[in-house]
């Protein structure tokens, strides 16, 4: 399983970004995919997760601004981030769980929000 995250970059506060995570190398529908964020010196934290049938859950502090989605046909997951704040900055990682419960991680994509 390979995961490739993209879409990060520099954006002004109040702006938007859409992250993508392209998954490959498998033939199952992942029961869970998710986005996590990490900033230097802190633990990786959950941003949002989505099940194979599209049920999603986001961190309470982000759910009004961030939307997770997935396209199973394209094996791609997305994170639409609106009204970005400087505290949203960090490295965003995508993760995929296989039916056996093993989790795979992609390389992160950096998000920087200028004030």
Image (tube, rainbow, N blue to C red):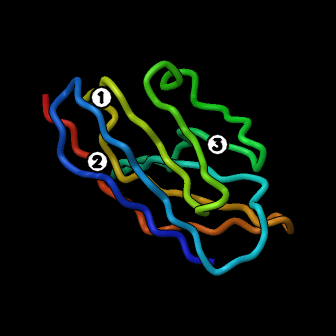
Name the residue rendered at 40%, 49% in the picture.
19
**Crowding at label 2, few (<14), some or many (≥20) Cα neighbours within 10 Å?**
many
Q: Outermost residue toward the bottom?
A: 25
Tag 1–tag 2 contact (CB < 8 Å): yes
Q: Nearer the viewer, residue 109 or 73?
A: 73
**Crowding at label 1, few (<14), some or many (≥20) Cα neighbours within 10 Å?**
many
Q: Is residue 61 above or below residue 20?
A: above
**Crowding at label 3, few (<14), some or many (≥20) Cα neighbours within 10 Å?**
many
**To which residue does mark 2 refer?**
111
Q: Outermost residue toward the front?
A: 73
Q: Is residue 92 above or below residue 47?
A: below
The Cα atoms of the two marked residues, 3 and 2, are separated by 19 Å
**To which residue does mark 3 refer?**
49
Q: Nearer the viewer, residue 61 or 51?
A: 51
Q: Is residue 106 above or below residue 36?
A: below
Disc 3 element = strand
Q: Outermost residue toward the right?
A: 100
Could you say where residue 33 lies in the image, as x and y percent from the top left?
65, 53
């Amino acid at each position: 399983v390979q995961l490739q995250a993209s879409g990060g970059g520099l954006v002004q506060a109040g702006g938007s970004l859409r992250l993508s995570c392209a998954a490959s190398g498998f033939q199952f529908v992942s029961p869970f995919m998710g986005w996590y964020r990490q900033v230097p010196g802190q633990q990786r934290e959950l941003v949002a997760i989505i099940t194979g049938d599209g049920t999603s859950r986001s961190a309470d502090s982000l759910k009004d601004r961030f939307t997770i989605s997935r396209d199973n046909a394209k094996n791609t997951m997305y994170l639409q981030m609106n009204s970005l704040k400087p505290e949203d900055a960090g490295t965003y990682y995508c993760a995929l769980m296989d039916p056996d419960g093993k989790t795979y991680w992609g390389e992160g994509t950096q998000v920087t929000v200028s004030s």
